[in-house]
Image (spheres, rainbow, N blue to C red):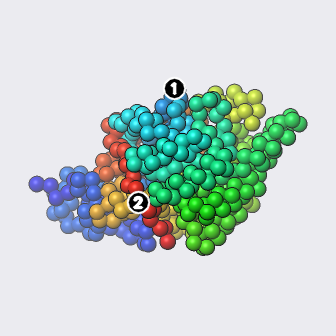
Amino acid sequence: MYSYDLVFTGGTVVFPDKVQQTDIAVHNGVIVHIGNLSCEDIERSRQIVNAEGLYIMAGMIDAHVHLNEPGFGDWEGFVTGSAALAAGGCTTYMDMPLNGVPPTVTPAALQQKRELAAGHSHIDYACWGGLVPGNLQELDALSEQGVCGFKAFMSAPGDPSEEAFRNVDDRTLLEGMKHIARMGRVLALHAESEPIVSAWTAALLAEERTTAADYSASRPIQAELEAVRTALEYGRQAGCALHFVHISSAAAVRMIQEARQEGMDVTLETCPHYLTLTDVDLEQIGPAAKCAPPLRSLDEQELLWQCVAAGDIDMITSDHSPCPTMLKTAAAHMFDAWGGISGAQHSLELMISEGYRKRDLPLPLISRMLSQAPARRFRLYPQKGEIRIGADADLVLVDLNTAYTVQSEQLLYRHKHSPYVDREIGCQVSMTVVRGHIVYTREKGVRDHAVGQSLHIRNEKPLSLS
């Protein structure tokens, strides 16, 4: 008779408050023992992983991913997107409501998305609902069906088609916040001021200014700050819990943190591309590095790293927003290219390589941003987000002694472009485990059997991150 289903021996384990070499035992998909195991217990285990020389962390929970189903045909879907996430050490992702037709703004659309994902995702997943003009009456049903929260755009999402996701007007934003507050849910916000962005864009295009630098100029930090300021004011009026996505400037981080200190229930994320790439990279790499908000200057990037080190950034997400390569390479100019970065496969490795190896940030801090904070904020805790007895065995084993250079043929995305191609990363994911299932190894790649489950998020007040 087996003692455990799976054991990890000799690994260096990253806990929320410490790093310690110890063993981990798993039974029925759950962590049941942490501590040194006897030789007898190890020998009587169904599967043994020798983790000596490797670091074991809670699997990343990527709270901001765009997988383009339903309705986007040849775009990234659940199979390839979840495979790339698994290879990058992610064990749970949260799929955004846009870049699908129909967008996830009704219960029927949510059901359609879940049916497409069922049996095709290599890792666990949850779905965001959308707040758009005209769907206030759908929010209650979406909440009852277990979305992890709601997402709204304060600037135009960029897809001009009639059935696409739409940005909110001021009335919808305020009324939506009031409604979401009554449900006890979180509203995530793409915070860029549409009046500022559209005015700058029109002026630059009128002068036929279409370079990478011009695109960056069309979406200044001022646009982010103005939208954050407006959303915070509405959030105060409505009493709504807010989460700001892909924040790109230290000034916006400070504004959000000040609101939290005044008592608001508000969190924020930034992304690896704002911490590893700059506006100069956009000029050199081209449309593969185009995103919104755009990449900022090296000085702004350094200020953002200071916010990370100070603990002012709650979480790190990929904002994986893929597209067919042609929409990047065949665009007439930078404004016409698809705005979104394919980065989900490298988020955890980049944060460890840049944050821990180059900047000496503590691994527990990095793990909290990648795993614990999203689990707590979006109600996946206590089952996910930490290495602890009773939690799901969602783990990533990382080799901190193996650097490698990203090559396009290594990418598991459906369309193999990324701004990180040819970049050296100072660590490498060795294994990814979801609820005790080994879903990826560096030697064999992603396993064929997709074990990912849909997570229906309970409807109650979000947990504090303090």
Residue located beneath label 2 in the image: 460
Specify the quadrant of the image occupied by residue 177. Answer: bottom right
Reply above or below: 215 against 428: above
Residue 402 x, y percent position in the rendering: 49, 53
With 54 as the anchor, is 186 left or right in this view? right
The amino acid at mark 2 is Glu
Q: Can residue 97 be seen in the rendering of this structure?
A: no
Specify the quadrant of the image occupied by residue 206. Answer: top right
Which element type, helix, strand or loop, lies under badge 1? Answer: loop
- Viewer-side residue, 29 vs 176: 176
With 247 as the anchor, is 442 left or right in this view? left
Residue 186 x, y percent position in the rendering: 51, 56
Residue located beneath label 1 in the image: 73
The amino acid at mark 1 is Gly
Residue at 67% x, 50% y is 170
Residue at 30% x, 54% y is 49
Residue 341 x, y percent position in the rendering: 61, 42
Specify the quadrant of the image occupied by residue 167. Answer: top right
